[in-house]
Structure formats: structure tokens, C-alpha cells
Amino acid sequence: MVMRESAEIAALFGASTLRRPSSVELGWKGFAVERRTALPGEKPELRLDHHFIILWDMRVAEGEFAYRGDRFSPYRKLPHTLTTLPPGIRPAARSRSAHEVIVGALHPDLVRGVEEELDRRPSGTLRELYGTNDPDLRNLLLLVVRESEMGGRCGTLYAESLIAALATRLVYAARSAPMSTPTSASPLPRRLLQRVLDRMQADLGADLSLATLAAATGYSRGHFLRMFRAATGQTPHRYLTELRLAKARDLIVGGSMPLIEIAAACGFSSHAHLTTAFRSRFGLAPSSYRRGP
């Protein structure tokens, strides 16, 4: 079976192969993440229309980048460091050996939307990061690629929150600005909070998105996230998970409904996903909890 892939990431690396399935299979909007092995060889100059975050993985990557026409300058990228590329011209390059990468591609509209929602927008010029050690950016990229490789098990709300955090960190890092300390957000007004909670309760089995919940309040996604957390002390994803686990517990205790059906009814992607979350929350697997002491 031929795996689908990101056309933008494939074009960036030229001769390369997927190491795991691409997030393209999950249909995430404005973002794709992949593990690739880039093969040695020539890469022509390329116009980029996305933002890219590249995590150099496993081994040193060496090669040359073109500058001033036909002159080349060597590069050496160490494992676990990051390179970012904004939209624009990527010069021709030569890679000397195969190397492994984890790469995220962000559509400019996604980055622009996240930036417009920031309380304090950084004003520096958007620049490339070159062999940078940024633990926050790296860890967010690793979290989102892990969610992709788990088949989007935690749902759209979780994935969108991770992607928004990744884009926010990219904006601050690429504009050479320290992350601002958020001012205390006002709690979501009670009537709007209740509207969101009612929507969650009504659609526990649905794959709710951050945009859907934010639309119920009339606020942008960024403001909704901050105000919801100020009102509840939890992220929307964590709160929704708690509601799903509470319903699953009631169904487990109150009847003989098969666990795979309970998982589907409560919005968990699989029996295994329900079991992992349930054990983490209640200290027992669902089957053990049903049997009782």
C-alpha cells in the first residue's frame, strides 16, 4: 500500500523516504509532520510557501549550501538540533550522506492566525534558526509527531492545541523574542462556559475541535483556551477527557455493555485508548474496575 505524504515536505527534501506514516492521513488542517530519511544528492533551489521546522535526528547531517551563485558553504547539523525555514527561497544544496529528520510543515495562514491571537505579538524580523537547541520547540514537535504516529488517538482537540502551541513557540523563537509571560486571563463568563460544557456533554462521542468549542463562545481559539483554563483550571482537552472518563465509569459499573462499545460511546479511539486513560485516572483497568474488589 502506498502511503500518502505531504507534497511540501517531499519537495523540500527531494530524494527521501517516509520512515513512518505521515500525519496527512489524519487530515489535520494547515499542518503536516513526518519522519523521513533524506538521501544524499543534489537539491535544486526551491521556493517555499510553508514554514518548516526540521529536527535533525539520530546522526550528524553534513553537506553544502549554495550562496552567491555557484559558491558552496559546508553545513553540519548535530542530532537533536533544529533548523527552521520561513516561506521564501531555499538555496540549492548538496547532502553528502543519508540522514534522518522529523519535519513539520505549517501553512502561513495557520502561523498568521496564531500570531494574530497573541496578547503581545513579537515585533522582530522573522528569521531562520540554524542548528538551534530549543528544548521547548523540540519537545512540542516530538509530542505532535508522537500523536500522529499513534493515529491521532487523543483526538482533534488535543492535536490542534499542540499545533497551536508549536506555532506559537516558532513565532517567538524565529522572531528572536522571549516568550511573554501571559497576563492573568479573565475567566470565561458563566453562561458561555455552560454553553461549552453543554456542547461537550452532548457530543462526548464526537471528535470535537478547538475551533468548534471556541465558536460557541465567540472568542478566538487563543482567547478561548486562556479563558477556559482560567475558569476551570484545566485545558479543554483535559476537561473533556474527565467527562468522558466519568461517563465510561458509569457505563462500566452500571451494566454489561462491551468495553469496545463503551470506548466508542465515550469518544475514545479504541479499547486500548480507554484502558490507558482509565487506568491512569482510576488506578485500575476497566475490566478490573467492573469486577470490583
Image (cartoon, helix red, strand yellow):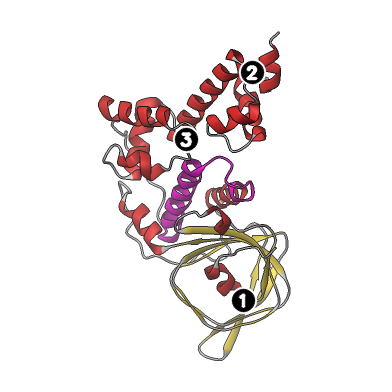
Whether residue 167 is in magenta: the answer is yes
Residue 261 drawn at (x, y percent)? 60, 29
Q: Is residue 154 left or right of residue 123?
A: right
How crowded pointer 1 is (Cα within 10 Å; few <14, some 14-19, many 20+) is rated as some
Viewer-nearest of labels 3 and 2? 2
Indicate which disc, 3 or 2, sits on the residue closer to the N terminus.
3
Residue 237 drawn at (x, y percent)? 47, 35
**Tag 1 and tag 2, C-beta contact below 8 Å:** no
How crowded pointer 2 is (Cα within 10 Å; few <14, some 14-19, many 20+) is rated as few
Q: Tell me the distance, in whole angstroms, between the alpha carbons under discs 3 and 2.
A: 28 Å
The front one of 174 and 8 is 8
Point 66% across, 16% down: residue: 289
| Residue placed under numbered mark 2 in the picture | 256
Q: Is residue 126 left or right of residue 267?
A: left
Which mark, by number, is residue 14?
Answer: 1
Indicate which disc, 1 or 3, sits on the residue closer to the N terminus.
1
Q: Is residue 263 left or right of residue 213?
A: right
